[in-house]
Image: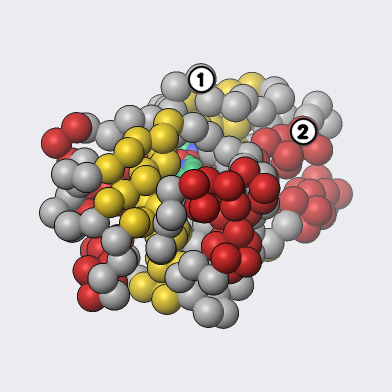
Amino acid sequence: MLLLGGTAEARALAARLHPEVEVISSLAGRVPEPALPVGEVRIGGFGGPDGLRRWLQDNGVDAVVDATHPFAARMTATAAAVCAELNLPHLLLARPGWPTDGAIVVSSDVEAARTVVEQRFQRVFLTSGRSSIPAFTDVDAWFLIRVVTAPEPEVLPRRHQLLLSRGPYHYDDELRLLREHRIDALVTKNSGGTMTRAKVDAAAALGIPVVMIDRPPLPAGVTTVGTVDDAVAWVSSLTAS
Ligand code: NAP
């Protein structure tokens, strides 16, 4: 089984299936020293749909579980298209999003940046990931930017502080951070999951507005589950048949 990973859920699924199912976990290779799942791991892109098709055929893969991050839309679309074409059993493990009540929901990083300008937010906690920073380069506000790996210096907004770290994050620490930096808005993707949720809960507790970037749509026609338990059940149903 090929397990497209890069999330806590993918690591949990690998741990549940190993060693009964021969799982190869795949990571994009975006972050240095990634948290590794148990079992076999390969790192790096496949080279688009043609590369993935070849890789699946060369490695005699029987099934694919896509447990990538909800915003990894390109990988998810590629896996859906190639699996449909090869008629390979394919499951999408898409963890539920966070509740959006009270949040300003936007559809992209560019719209999030526009919202910061329109709402005249002045001290923004920017947590929507490295690739979203260019949308904020020219915004005239102060940013606390939390990312796993440092962005190119030229994309950073003029007034900012960079915080290099990776989750999980805890509620009390997030409260302290928001207070200490006198944050007046949080910008986040609707990633879902427990590892990074505390910032959203802390912002809500302090009455700080949350600008939440909505998820890209899921590909049509793919069997989708929301939990690791349901993914294990899907794999079991395949191995039983
Ligand atoms: P993306 O835009 O959908 O993917 C871009 C390209 O990266 C894909 O076309 C593929 O290259 C390669 N790739 C992505 N995931 C891969 C995987 N698991 N194994 C092998 N190649 C992969 O995805 P992304 O937003 O850059 O995310 C990359 C990885 O980081 C994902 O595995 C995701 O789970 C993880 N991640 C993403 C976020 C986020 O906010 N986007 C947050 C945390 C973790 P080829 O076309 O060459 O095959």
Q: Is residue 31 visible?
A: yes
Label disc, if present, on residue 15 of the rendered structure: 2
- Give the x, y percent position of residue 52: 41, 38
- 103 and 213: which is toward the camera: 103
Mark 1 or 2 closer to N-term? 2
Question: Where does ligand 1 appear, by image quarter?
Answer: top left
Dot 2: element: helix
> What separation in Å lies between label 1 and label 2 (alpha carbons)?
19 Å
Report the side of 49 relative to 236 (left or right): left
- Give the x, y percent position of residue 47: 32, 35
- Compared to residue 216, the image places residue 172 above or below, namely above
- Give the x, y percent position of residue 11: 67, 36
- 141 and 7: which is toward the camera: 141
Disc 1 under 8 Å from ligand 1? The reply is no
Q: Quadrant of residue 37?
A: top right
Q: Look at discs 1 and 2 and give the one toward the viewer.
A: 1
- Give the x, y percent position of residue 197: 61, 55
Report the side of 83 relative to 46 (left or right): right
Q: How many marks?
A: 2
Q: Amino acid at mark 1?
A: Glu
Please name the residue that numbered disc 1 is placed on: 33
Label disc, if present, on residue 212 of the rendered structure: none
Q: Is residue 75 visible?
A: no
Report the side of 8 relative to 207 (left or right): right
Location of the N terminus by quadrant is: top right
Q: Amino acid at mark 2?
A: Ala
Q: Residue furthest bottom?
A: 101
Q: Residues within 10 Å of mark 1 (few under 14, many from 20)?
A: few
Residue at screen point 38% across, 30% down? 149
Residue at screen point 34% across, 56% down? 123
Report the side of 234 relative to 117 (left or right): right
